[in-house]
Amino acid sequence: MLLEPDISDAILDSPFTSHMDESCPPLLNVLRVCDVPDVLGAIAPRPITISGWDSTESKKVTQIYSAANSSKHLTLH
């Protein structure tokens, strides 16, 4: 999605909160570069809806969207 301009927005239902989660698929060395909130924040300024995360889990994504002046494009349920 990050590199695909034809995708205008994303809707995520209970995405993994970190690659450290035991149930998350293993991706070799991914944490050297980024974690799930970093990638979701990189989608800004495109609209994104995330459900199933609490305010603690979504804090970093919220901060990134705010820094990009795109808070109105982030919806948390």
Image (tube, rainbow, N blue to C red):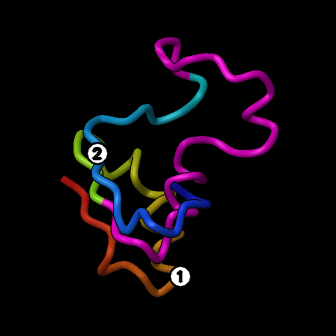
As for residue 39 lying within the magenta part, the answer is yes
State the image quarter where residue 29 is shown: top right
Q: Is residue 17 above or below residue 77?
A: above
The residue lying toward the viewer, choosing from 19 and 27, is: 27
In the drawing, does residue 73 fall left or right of residue 19?
Answer: left
Q: Which mark is residue 54?
A: 2
CA distance separating discs 1 and 2: 21 Å
Tell me residue 53's x, y (percent): 30, 43
In the drawing, does residue 66 fall left or right of residue 8?
Answer: right
Q: Please give the residue where the numbered disc 1 appears in the rendered image.
A: 68
In the drawing, does residue 10 fall left or right of residue 38?
Answer: left
Q: Where does the magenta region start and end?
A: 21-48
Query: Dot 2: what SS?
Result: loop
As for residue 35 lying within the magenta part, the answer is yes
The residue lying toward the viewer, choosing from 6 and 49, is: 6
Disc with the residue nearer the chain's start (1 vs 2)? 2
